């Protein structure tokens, strides 16, 4: 008897829920019961997950399954799990290698192929305005959440030695002040690609595309357009090939993270982690969903398009890892090349919804832990500071912590290193905020496309 795909998917969700329940709750709630028995049950359920994922042949199912198996391996076989970290690193290196040519090809074809320079400027202005409004709302939601839960009040947790060392290392990287506005513009495109400066690649590609659109010789123009279109198509195929490695990369990244940090640390700072995830959920329901409805974005098809990049971002805690797949899926969804190529990479630096929400929340949390009461005016001042400092720093290792530490350092009675206690659960929180960053950017591309009258709804509904 054949089992339908939808039934397989239902089985997958049920088994996933059972796995998570056994993994995180059952053993801690009933420690006197046989742990080996629970472990064997979990292993059986994970094998069933793999079978269902194989039958459905969906990347998102494989990624979720790899996440659960990675957590299990990280808990039970930490030495082996640490060795698996290299798969995540290999995956990210491959992703970085294709981001610049993919952005270049997509933007050149999208802009120069239409030669509407006024529209390019209009899209840019709409994008920046949209980014600023949405991220500002995210900042205040984070502020509201931490004031409601008071998650830091009464918390007495000492930063671990390794977290203190990591904070010192990250803060040491902030050796010189950089003008983020100046840093947007490339001085050497090869250097920008080598240093993975996505926004600089975007600026170069836009100017190059405008220049190409101004070329009068149709033969020369067509040659470069054909090259760029071919480059774009090849890079999308390159992405498809790399995505075959994604489940293994997710497994390795999560297994090594659990092996390094363990899951016990969650219980000490669970209120902080819970506050973040509830706030992110509220942000999606109260802000992103209404925006999608107002812009008449078909929600079900949109969710189907963003499932893979969002789950990939969640598992790897890297917006960069999800960027190529997000661009490919949003173009398939019905957003034009020129809008996908501009909005998504630009949003990677300016539309960090999850990160900005986290920063406002975490800053107040550190103050609450230290017993420092911040007035409403002081908290609003923190938000205005974060509105500026959180822009244009994507791609910098530990950037969110550096911004957090810098903001905390501006509060009287606190020093930047006092934020290091948060590093104990930063990996788990990073997964949530990164996935919302990707979700917000994908929605932004659809909203901008709708505002331009170019969201291909018929194509999206196929």
Image (cartoon, grey):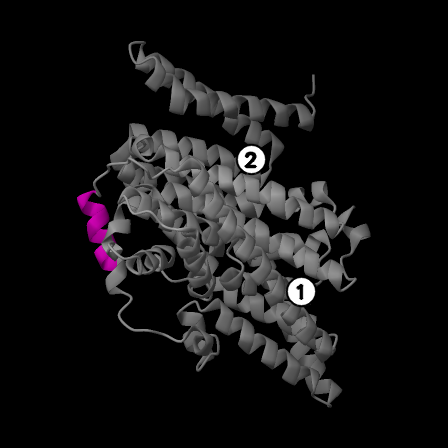
Would you name the residue on which mark 1 appears?
339
Element carrying mark 2: helix
The range drawn in magenta is 160-169
Q: Is residue 314 above or below residue 168?
A: above
Question: Is the residue under label 2 in contact with that under label 1 (CB below 8 Å)?
Answer: no
Where is residue 181 shown, x and y percent of the image? Answer: 46, 75
* Residue 344 shows in this picture: no
The Cα atoms of the two marked residues, 1 and 2, are separated by: 29 Å
Residue marked by disc 2: 61
Quarter of the N terminus within the rendering: top right
Q: Is residue 224 magenta?
A: no
Tell me if mark 2 has few (under 14), some (14-19) or many (20+) residues whose alpha carbon lies within 10 angstroms of its own: many
The quadrant in which residue 265 appears is top left
Residue 134 point in image, percent of width and height: 58, 56
- Residue at 55% across, 46% down: 310
Q: Residue at x 27, y 43 (%)?
A: 371
Nearer to us in this view, 296 or 61: 296
Q: Residue furthest left?
A: 161
The dominant secondary structure in magenta is helix
Q: Is residue 167 magenta?
A: yes
- The number of callouts visible is 2
């Amino acid at each position: 008897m054949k089992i339908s795909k939808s039934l397989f998917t239902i089985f997958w969700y049920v088994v996933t829920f059972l796995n998570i329940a056994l993994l995180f709750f059952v053993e801690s709630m009933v420690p006197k019961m046989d742990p080996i028995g629970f472990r064997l049950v979990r292993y059986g359920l994970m094998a069933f997950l793999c079978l269902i994922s194989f039958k459905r042949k969906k990347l998102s199912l494989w990624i979720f399954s790899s996440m659960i198996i990675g957590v299990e391996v990280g808990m039970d076989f930490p030495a082996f799990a640490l060795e698996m970290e290299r798969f995540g690193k290999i995956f990210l290196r491959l992703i970085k290698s294709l981001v610049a040519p993919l952005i270049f090809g997509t933007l050149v074809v999208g802009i120069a192929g239409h030669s509407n320079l006024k529209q390019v400027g209009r899209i840019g202005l709409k994008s920046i305005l949209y980014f600023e409004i949405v991220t500002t709302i995210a900042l205040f939601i984070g502020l509201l959440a931490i004031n409601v839960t008071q998650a830091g009040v009464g918390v007495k947790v000492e930063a671990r030695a390794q977290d203190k060392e990591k904070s010192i290392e990250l803060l040491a990287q902030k050796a010189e002040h950089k003008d983020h506005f100046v840093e947007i513009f490339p001085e050497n495109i090869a250097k920008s690609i080598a240093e993975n400066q996505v926004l600089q690649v975007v600026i170069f590609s836009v100017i190059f595309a405008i220049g190409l659109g101004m070329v009068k010789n149709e033969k020369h123009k067509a040659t470069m357009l054909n090259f760029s279109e071919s480059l774009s198509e090849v890079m999308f195929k390159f992405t498809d090939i790399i995505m075959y490695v994604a489940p293994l990369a997710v497994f390795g990244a999560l297994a090594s993270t659990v092996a390094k940090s363990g899951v016990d640390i969650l219980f000490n700072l669970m209120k902080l982690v819970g506050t973040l995830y509830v706030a992110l959920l509220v942000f999606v329901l109260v802000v992103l969903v209404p925006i999608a409805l107002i812009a008449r974005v078909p929600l079900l098809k949109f969710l189907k398009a963003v499932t893979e990049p969002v789950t990939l971002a969640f598992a790897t805690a890297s917006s960069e890892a999800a960027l190529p797949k997000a661009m490919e899926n949003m173009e398939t969804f019905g957003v034009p090349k020129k809008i996908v190529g501009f909005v998504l990479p630009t949003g990677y630096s300016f539309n960090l919804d999850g990160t900005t929400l986290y920063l406002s929340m975490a800053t107040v949390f550190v103050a609450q832990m230290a017993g420092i009461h911040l007035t409403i005016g002081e908290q609003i001042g923190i938000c205005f500071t974060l509105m500026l400092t959180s822009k244009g720093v994507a791609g910098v290792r530990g950037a969110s912590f550096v911004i957090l530490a810098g903001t905390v350092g501006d509060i009287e009675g606190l020093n930047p290193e006092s934020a290091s206690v948060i590093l104990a659960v930063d990996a788990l929180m990073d997964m949530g905020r990164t996935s919302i960053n990707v979700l917000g950017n994908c929605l932004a591309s659809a909203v901008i496309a709708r505002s331009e009258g170019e969201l291909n709804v018929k194509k999206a509904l196929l």
